[in-house]
Amino acid sequence: MLGTTMPDTADQEDLRLSYSSLLSNQIAEMVHGISYSLPAPMYVRNIEAKEILLKEPQIASVLEKARNCQAGIFGIGTLSEHCSLAALDKEKTDLVLRMAQRGGAGEIIGRVFDEEGKQIPNEIDEHLIGLNFEEIHQIPNRIGVAFGKEKVKAIHAALKGDWINILITDSLTAEALASI
C-alpha cells in the first residue's frame, strides 16, 4: 500500500525488521494468502518520476489490488526522528519534527494526522507512492498494529480519525488507551 525505502541513515538490521515486503510475505504465509509487493520507492523527489512510475503495469496493478482489498494492515507510526518519513533525509526529519510540534500525532503509510485524527497535508504527500488518505478510508477492514507507551497518542488519534477500525496491540498499551 506504500512503496518501500532503505535510507542510508537507517540501521540495516532494524529497518529489515520493518521492511513492508518482508512483513507482508510473512503474514501471507501464516494465513495461507498471497502477498503482492509494491515494486516502487516510498518517496520520490521528482513528481514527474512518480507519474511515470505510477503508469508502470506492475506498480499500477499492485496499487489497484490495494484499493480493492477487503483488509489492510497498517503500522501506526509516531512523528519522531526515527519514523520512516524522517529517515528519508535531514530535511524531512526537520519537517516531521515541525509537524509534531504543530499537533501532529502520528502517521499511517506516510500519511500524517493530528490528535483528532485529521490528515495534515504536507509537502511529502505528493511525493509518496502509495494509497492516499481517501483510498485508505475505502478499505473495509483497516487493521492497525502498534504497541508501546510512545505510540498511545498516535493510536488514539488513528482511532479517532477512523484511520483504523481494528487494533492489534499489547495489554499495557490497551490499558493506557482505555484510560484516555
Image (cartoon, rainbow, N blue to C red):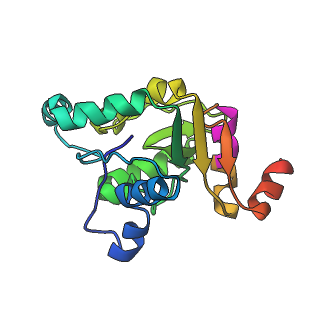
Q: Who's the residue at 44% across and 49% down the image?
A: 96
Could you say where residue 102 lies in the image, as x and y percent from the top left?
Answer: 55, 41
Query: In this rendering, would 88 be left or right of 112?
Result: left
Over which residues does the magenta segment extend? 155-161
Count all numbered tags in the image, as a single digit.
0
Q: Is residue 144 above or below residue 61?
A: below
Q: Is residue 142 magenta?
A: no
Q: Return the x and y of residue 45 as percentages of the image width and height.
A: 20, 43
Check the image and report above or below for 109 versus 118. below
Q: Is residue 113 visible?
A: yes
Q: Please determine whether, in this image, residue 148 is positioned above or below residue 63.
A: below
Place residue 90 in its image quadrant: bottom left
**In the depicted view, which residue is nearer to us: 155 or 58?**
58
Which quarter shows the N terminus? top left
Q: Residue at x 15, y 33 (%)?
A: 56
Is 146 placed left or right of 89 in the picture? right
Percent coordinates x, y for residue 36 in the rendering: 33, 45
- The residue most toward the front is 32
- The one nearer the camera, 176 or 72, is 72
Q: Is residue 103 visible to us here? A: no
Which SS does the magenta portion mostly show? Answer: helix
Q: Position of residue 21 (x, y in %)?
A: 35, 55
